Amino acid sequence: MKKLFIAVCTVIASIAVVAQTNDEQYDKAYKLKIEFKYKEALPLFQSLLKSDSNNVNYLAHASYIYSKYGFFYAPEAEKMKYYHTAEYLSKKAIKLNEKSADAHFAYAMALGRINENASSKQKIANAKLIKSEVDRAIALNPKLAGAHHILGRWHRTIAGFNSVEKMMINSFFGGVPPGGSYDDAVKAFMTAISIEPKYMNHQYELAQTYYDMGKPVEAKLWAKKALEIIPVSDDDRKAKTECETLLKKLN
C-alpha cells in the first residue's frame, strides 16, 4: 500500500511539473506573439501543441502565428502550407470552444491569407465565411483590434467591386456577401486604431481606404500619422514602406 501511495504521489507530482512547464512556456510564447516576434514564438507553440493538442489557447494563438510566419518568412512555394495549417488549427479550436474569440479571429485571418491564391469562386465563398467569423470574434470580444482590422479590409474589398463584377458574382458565384461600404471600412479601422493606436498597419489601411474613396487629404493625413509611429516589428516596417509608397502617389 505504501509503495502504491508513493507511486501515485510521483505521478501527480510529474503531472504538476508538466503543467507548470507548459504554463511557463505558454506565457513566454504569448509574450513573443504580442511583441510581434513570430519567428521566436512559432517553435514554442509547436512544442505546446505536441504536449497538448486540445488546448484551445494553444491552437488559436498557434494558428495566428502560422498565418503571420507564412506571410512574412515562408518561401513563396510553402506559404499556403502555413495558411492551411493555420486554418486547421483555428477550426479545431472553434470545435473545442465555439466561444473563443481568438479562434474565430485566427480562422478569419487564415481564410484571408488563403484567398490570396484562391480561385474566384473560392474567394467569394471564403469572403462570406470571413465576414461571419470576424463578426463572431467581435461579438465575443469587442476589444479584439485585429478582428476590426479584418472587418475593415472586408468592407473595403466588397465596396471596391464595380457593377459588372457584382453582376458576374451574382450570376456565377451565388451573390455578393451582404454589406460592404467604404464608410463601414473607415469605422472598422477607426475602431482598431482606438484599441491599438501604436500599430502602424491600422493607420496605413485607413489611409489606403481614404485613397480608394477619392479623399486624398484624409489619405495623406493618416499616412503621415502612421509614419509618426516608430517601427518595432516586421508588420510596422511593411506598413511604413506602404505608407511611403502611398504618399508618393498623393504628392
Image: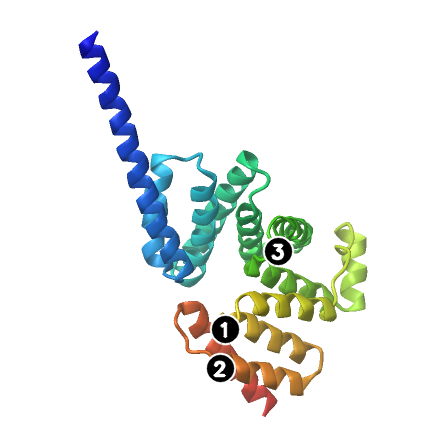
User: Which residue is nearer to you in this view: 11 or 46?
Assistant: 11
Q: CA distance from mark 3 to mark 1?
A: 20 Å
Q: Amino acid at mark 3?
A: Pro
Q: Is residue 57 left or right of residue 3?
A: right
Q: Kindly check if marks 3 and 1 are in contact, taking CB atoms under 8 A apart as contact.
A: no
Q: Is residue 20 left or right of residue 129?
A: left
Q: Amino acid at mark 1?
A: Met
Q: Which residue is mark 2?
A: 227
| Farthest left residue in view | 3
Q: To which quarter of the image does residue 169 belong? A: bottom right
Identify the mark nearer the N-term, 2 or 3. 3
Q: Kindly check if marks 1 and 2 are in contact, taking CB atoms under 8 A apart as contact.
A: yes
Q: Which residue is mark 3?
A: 142
Q: Nearer the viewer, mark 3 or mark 1?
A: 3
Q: Which residue is mark 1?
A: 200
Q: CA distance from mark 2 to mark 3?
A: 27 Å
